[in-house]
Amino acid sequence: MRKAPILLLVTSAALALSACAKKAPPELPKPPQDTAPTPTPTPQTSTPTPSGPRPGSQADFVASVTSDRIFFDTDKSDVDDADKATLQSQAAWLQKYPQVRVTIEGHCDERGTREYNLALGERRANAAKNYLASLGIDAGRLTVISYGKERPDALGSDEASWAKNRRAVSVVVE
């Protein structure tokens, strides 16, 4: 008995709402026509955005110098003539950007103990730092860190891979 009045109430509410529904117009109105004139392009007064890397950045450094890294012989940390040419290129770039600081990372191949390679990596980084300082770069702008054998550039246990991993890499601090 109680269901009948509720059913009657719901049905009458549904009929009332359906009677109030809007009917779609027989035809949609046309869109408004654009009467505004086409704007004429104005010449740019701002300076164009430079293309290429931002001056003084790591990308600019890598693009401008001979190389961002020098390589060493097995168990050695001395800078040879090829390395000197690379470091001279880096020094010229650093003189152009006197506000830039650089971290020199020392790396080794996988052979040897962790402790030995950390010490050797530090000697390699310091050799690069000392040569750059001898070229007039303020040593206060240059920091060194040794990664030993922890960050190899080339994976493999052959002479070609080891040669790529015995390096000092200059990285711009941004």
Image (spheres, grey):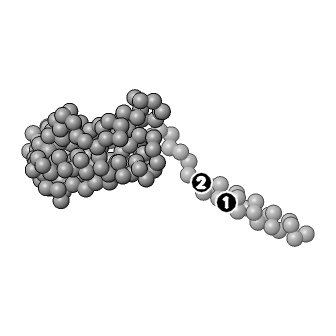
| Image quarter hosting the N terminus | bottom right
30 sits left or right of 143 in the view: right
Q: Which percent across, then down, holds residue 164?
A: 36, 34
Q: Residue beneath label 2, please?
A: 21
Q: Which percent across, then down, holds residue 172?
A: 24, 49
> What mark, if any, has residue 30 been given in the picture?
none
Give me the residue at 36% from left, 33% from top.
Answer: 163
Give me the residue at 29% from left, 43% from top.
Answer: 77
Task: Name the residue nearer the viewer: 112 or 6.
Answer: 112
Task: Name the residue nearer the viewer: 73 or 89.
Answer: 73
Contact? badges 1 and 2 (CB < 8 Å): no
Q: Residue beneath label 1, please?
A: 16
Give me the residue at 25% from left, 56% from top.
Answer: 143
Q: What residue type is labelled 2?
A: Ala
| Image quarter hosting the C terminus | bottom left
The local crowd at label 1, few if under 14, some if 14 to 19, many if 20 or more residues have their Cα within 10 Å, is few
In terms of secondary structure, where does tag 1 sit?
A: helix
5 sits left or right of 70 in the view: right
Residue 46 appears in view: no
Q: What residue type is labelled 1?
A: Ala
Q: Which percent across, then down, holds residue 93?
A: 14, 43
